[in-house]
Amino acid sequence: MVRPMKTISCDICPAHFSAESFDDWFRQMQTHYMSDHADVMAAMAHKPKAEGQAWVVAARKRFDEG
Ligand SMILES: [Zn+2]
């Protein structure tokens, strides 16, 4: 089964990334966050772990529905 490429945008800026799987898209987002949203990453580090997990759940939902 060939999975179609999905293009999902960043939740902060208009940048978007194409991937066949959520994990692949998530890896690209991590790199993007580290280079373009380092301040958000830093702020996230001080928040409860649950918030980071909630972000991943919401991002996965956007990917699945996208
Ligand atoms: Zn972005």
Image (cartoon, grey):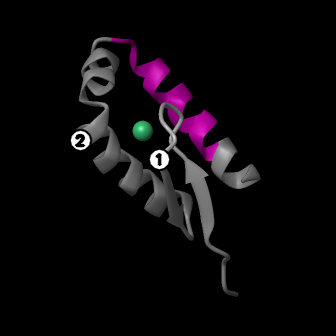
Residue occupying the far top of the picture: 47
Residue 10: x and y in percent read: 50, 41
Pointer 2 residue Cβ closer than 8 Å to ligand 1? no
Pointer 1 residue Cβ closer than 8 Å to ligand 1? yes
Query: Compared to 46, does 30 lie above or below?
Result: below
Q: Secondary structure at mark 1?
A: loop
Picture disc at residue 2: none
Query: Compared to 22, does 58 lie above or below?
Result: above
> Which residue carries the number 1 mark?
15
Disc 1: CA contacts within 10 A as few (<14), some (14-19) or many (>=20): few
Residue 35: x and y in percent read: 23, 41
Residue 12: x and y in percent read: 49, 31
Question: As shown in the figure, which amino acid type bears the numbered disc 1?
Answer: Ala
Q: Secondary structure at mark 2?
A: helix
Left or right relative to 7: residue 40: left
Residue occupying the far right of the picture: 65
Picture disc at residue 35: 2
Toward the viewer: 49 or 38? 38
Left or right relative to 63: residue 19: left
Q: Which residue is found at the position 70% from the left and 53% from the top?
A: 64
Quadrant housing residue 6: bottom right
Q: Which residue is found at the position 38% from the left and 56% from the top?
A: 28
Disc 2: CA contacts within 10 A as few (<14), some (14-19) or many (>=20): few
Which of disc 1 and disc 2 is earlier in sequence? 1
Residue occupying the far front of the picture: 14
Residue occupying the far bottom of the picture: 1
Q: Which residue is found at the position 24% from the left and 29% from the top?
A: 38
Query: Compared to 13, does 16 lie above or below?
Result: below
* Magenta span contains residue 31: no
The majority secondary structure of the magenta stretch comes to helix
The residues colored magenta run 47-60
Task: Determine the quadrant in which ligand 1 lies.
Answer: top left
